[in-house]
């Protein structure tokens, strides 16, 4: 499984390099979600967030990222809180209204440490803004989807109902992105 982390490791390496030489975050401050990519006011462009990048920079182990994508109001944040064994008031923000709670892409600041084939791996959990919410374009949704696909070692497509044709198209798009990324990196780590 070691080399299968290449997309996540390459993307995190790029995020790490994009982070400025800021001080290390306080370990007590890491038990929360941080934005790593935020939308502009009009939800047309994405920008890197220094907050989340700082949380990632301090990790010294190889990183695996579990990302969750899907339509808005489908329970992505709730699912991640369950995977992290966190209540909704202590984990990723969970909205109870029609508007989306998560904007852009967020990451849980404290990794879960695991041993994978004798290697200590830091597993991070990635929450994304849902697709098809009001006031956003399909291009914006595609950007969130593409970035989450490249960042994630494991990508969960969370659906609240049956699979639709649009879902199959998005999954096909994810495969194309992954193939392109693997082709460019030659299937090896970027570090």
Image: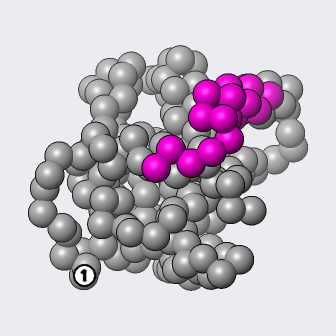
Task: In this rendered view, identify the residue nearer to me: 126 or 154.
Answer: 154
Q: Main secondary structure of the magenta part?
A: helix
Q: Is residue 23 left or right of residue 187?
A: left
For disc 1, the marked residue is 28
Magenta span contains residue 111: no
Mark yes or no: residue 155 visible. Answer: yes
Residue 46 is situated, as x and y percent measured from the top left of the image, at: 36, 29
Residue 27 is situated, as x and y percent measured from the top left of the image, at: 25, 79
Q: Is residue 54 left or right of residue 12?
A: left
Colour scheme: one colour
Mark yes or no: residue 74 visible. Answer: no
Task: In this rendered view, identify the residue nearer to me: 74 or 10.
Answer: 10
Task: In this rendered view, identify the residue nearer to me: 105 or 118.
Answer: 118
- Quarter of the rendering containing residue 2: bottom right
Instruction: Provide the secondary structure element on which disc 1 rests.
Output: helix
| 10 Å crowding of disc 1: few (<14), some (14-19), many (20+) | few
Quadrant of image for the N terminus: bottom right
Q: Residue at x 57, y 61 (%)?
A: 64
- Quarter of the rendering containing residue 105: top left
Q: Is residue 182 left or right of residue 136?
A: right
- Quarter of the rendering containing residue 17: top left
Magenta span contains residue 177: yes
Q: Residue at x 24, y 81 (%)?
A: 28
In the image, which residues are magenta?
172-191
Q: Residue at x 55, y 72 (%)?
A: 121
Residue 98 is situated, as x and y percent measured from the top left of the image, at: 51, 44
Residue 91 is situated, as x and y percent measured from the top left of the image, at: 44, 71
Mark count: 1
Q: Residue at x 19, y 76 (%)?
A: 26
């Amino acid at each position: 499984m070691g080399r299968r982390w290449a997309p996540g490791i390459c993307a995190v390496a790029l995020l790490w390099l994009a982070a400025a030489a800021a001080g290390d975050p306080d370990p007590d401050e890491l038990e929360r979600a941080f934005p790593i990519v935020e939308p502009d006011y009009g939800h047309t462009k994405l920008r890197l967030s220094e907050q989340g990048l700082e949380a990632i920079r301090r990790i010294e182990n190889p990183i695996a990222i579990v990302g969750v994508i899907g339509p808005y109001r489908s329970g992505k944040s709730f699912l991640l809180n369950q995977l992290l064994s966190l209540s909704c008031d202590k984990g990723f923000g969970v909205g109870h209204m029609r508007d989306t709670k998560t904007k852009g892409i967020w990451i849980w600041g404290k990794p879960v440490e695991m041993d994978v084939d004798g290697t200590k791996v830091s597993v991070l959990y990635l929450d994304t803004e849902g697709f098809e919410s009001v006031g956003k374009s399909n291009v914006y949704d595609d950007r969130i989807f593409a970035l989450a696909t490249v960042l994630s070692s494991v990508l969960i497509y969370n659906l609240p109902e049956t699979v639709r044709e649009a879902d199959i198209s998005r999954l096909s798009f994810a495969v194309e992105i992954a193939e392109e990324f693997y082709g460019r990196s030659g299937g090896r780590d970027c570090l």
